[in-house]
Amino acid sequence: MGMSMTEQDSKPKPYPALRNIQYSPMMQGEEHYIILWDPSGLSSEKLIIPLNLFHLFQFMDGEHSPEQIGVEYLKKYGEFLMPDKLDRLIADLDQKLFLEGERYEAAKAAAVKAYRDAPARTPRFAGKSYEAEPQKLREQVAGFFSSKEGPSPDPSEHQGKAIKGLVAPNYEVNVAGPIYAWAYKELREAEAPDVYILLGTAHAGLAGPVAVTDKDFESPLGVVPVNRPLMEALRSKGGDALFADELRHETEHSIEFQLPFL
């Protein structure tokens, strides 16, 4: 059946929905701009836009059409934003995977498959936040323990005892190494546990409350294996939903930074 021009025109256009994108102000000369990037690491792109266009991003919530977004620009600045300029901005955001939609979902699905097909999670920050060469890393970690900012050489009050857990940093190892050493001195001198359970911060955010991964973690000091029976028990009890966001582990540093100390 044919469709009249009126019916075609009444068909709603896609309403752009911005993903969880981070941004920061910057200046070029005397002009103020905003730089945007994807904290999840799925997209490596960056976008620099003037402040007047950044005002529109609050309306890219999946509930405003491009026409409605243009009206908001008119309300704010008292001038029209040419539709083709807004269309180009939306297309650029979509191309960079900054918008929800088919392009983003396809890229995410491919990234999840690649992560799950890999034999282990590769170290993302070796050579950047800590030494990548094994011997240099051992020396670096030893230096954190012996530095003047590091822990006292006196025995820990928990020496030989079981401890329930500890809180350690997840900041740059190159910078916060001695603080890591204060935490891991307690673990080194305590009664050795059978299994370590590492809980890290998801700096890029999660769709659900947690993101579990059953990947072994590679490190310059060797592969850190996960406890397979425990992972199978978690999956049996909690289902695949616990692993739905596991791609976040690929670019998240909070657990990787603990491995040189374990």
Image (cartoon, rainbow, N blue to C red):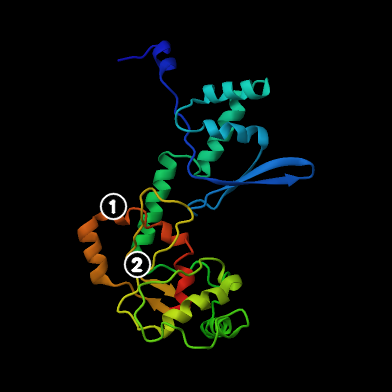
Q: In which quarter of the image is the N terminus?
A: top left
Q: Given the image, on which type of amino acid does mark 1 rest? A: Ala
Residue position marked by numbered label 2 in the rendering: 215
Residue position marked by numbered label 1 in the rendering: 241
Q: Is residue 28 left or right of residue 251?
A: right
Please state which of the two labelled residues, at mark 1 or mark 2, is closer to the viewer.
Answer: 1
Among all residues in the image, which is located at the extreme front?
Answer: 157
Few, some or many residues within 10 Å of mark 2 (<14, 14–19, 20+): many
- Of the residues under marks 1 and 2, which one precedes in the sequence? 2
Q: In which quarter of the image is the C terminus?
A: bottom left
Q: Is residue 158 left or right of residue 132?
A: left
Which structural element holds mark 1?
helix
Residue occupying image coordinates x 61% and y 33% = 55
Residue 11 badge: none
Image height check: is 159 above or below 29? below
Residue 245: x %, y % from top left: 37, 54
Residue occupying image coordinates x 62% and y 21% = 75
Residue 135: x %, y % from top left: 53, 86
Few, some or many residues within 10 Å of mark 1 (<14, 14–19, 20+): some
Q: In this view, does 224 lie to the left or right of 32?
A: left
Pick the front one: 188 or 81: 188
